[in-house]
Each structure stands twice: as structure tokens, then as C-alpha cells.
Image (cartoon, rainbow, N blue to C red):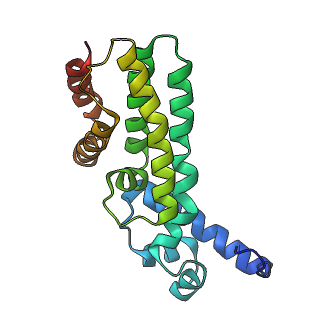
Amino acid sequence: MATGSKPLRADAARNRDKLLAAATRAFGEQGLDVPLEQIARTAGVSIGTLYAHFPTREAFADAILPAQLAALDDLAAAALAEPDPWLGFTGFIDGLFALQAKDHGLNDALARRQPLSPAVLEACRSGFEHAAKVVDRAKAAGQLRADFTPADLAPLVSAMSQVIRESPEVWRRHLAFFLDGLRT
């Protein structure tokens, strides 16, 4: 709700909450391109009610994705707390792709399959700033190839995103191939 706007009526707040729950579930199961009509139907509201609360798909993403992307901060903190920089790096990468495999909407956002709002892009940027620290720490310890840079994470995320989308049961196997090539 915007600053200075009136609080929602109780029924409107319930509808908004039902829409957010339905959208979170649908995005997670099917990705960001799930039909909005399906979200409205699942929430038990009309498409007009959906558009009254969330006039665009981007509005749903703004309400859902930043909090989900904050999990990257937690992954990075755990990685940086790991005494072994290589284990921290691999734990971060594995955790990142586990999140993507669990939530197809998050997978789509990180792979940028849909245009993302400034708020979601900022949450992505923040997560990848933390990831850069994990990468730099593993490189400084001599455990990660010197030519791997934080910028290399974006194409890795994109590639693994496609593996997750097409063959969700084999992504860890493919990740192991990749990580074997990165270790010094």
C-alpha cells in the first residue's frame, strides 16, 4: 500500500491476501508466465478484482519476488561463514540452484525470462553483490579458478535455469560437471 493511502477494507485485504497466496503458489509451480485468469480463479475472485489489486504482472512480481530473492543474502552469509572458501562457494551455488529448482517463478526471474521491475532488479543486484564476495573469497584462497569472475555467474544462472526448467531431476549432476571444471 502506498504511503498516505487509505487502509484496505477487510474484504479487500482478504482478497489481496488470497491473490498473493495464489500467485505465489502458481508462479512457484509454473513460472512467471502463468495466466492471470488462473490466479484469479484459484484465489476465488474475479479478474477485475485481480486487476484492481495488481494492475500488471509486474505488480505481482514486485509484491512476491524481492522477499524470495532475499534468500540469496542468507545463502551468501552462510557461504562466507563457512571456514572452507571452496565449500562456501559450492554451498552457495548449490543453494542458489536448489531455490530455483523449488520455485519456477524465481527461476524465471533469475534467468530474466520476463521483464523485471526496478524493485526486482535491485533485489537481484543485491543478491549478486553478495555472491561476488563468495566468488572473490574462494579465488583469494586459491580454490577457484583465477579466470572465473562474478560476472560469470549470470551466464551460469541462465544455463542452469534452462537445465532446471527442462530436466529438474538432473540439475545437480550438471552442476557437479561445472564445479569440477572450476576447482583449482
Say which quadrant the C terminus sits in.
top left
Residue at the location (23% across, 43% down)? 159
The location of residue 78, given as percent across then percent down, is: 55, 25
Q: In screen coordinates, is 51 left or right of 104?
A: right
Q: Is residue 3 above or below residue 127?
A: below
Residue 95 seen anywhere in this rendered image of the structure: no
On the question of residue 172 being in view, the answer is yes
State the residue in front, 58 or 172.
58
In the image, taking residue 147 as reference, residue 5 lies left or right, namely right
Residue 24, horizontal then vertical, whole percent: 52, 59
Quadrant of image for the N terminus:
bottom right
Residue drawn at x 37%, y 42% is 101
Q: Is residue 111 above or below residue 133?
A: below
Q: How many marks?
A: 0
In front here: 48 or 66?
Answer: 66
Viewer-proximal residue among 143 and 98: 143
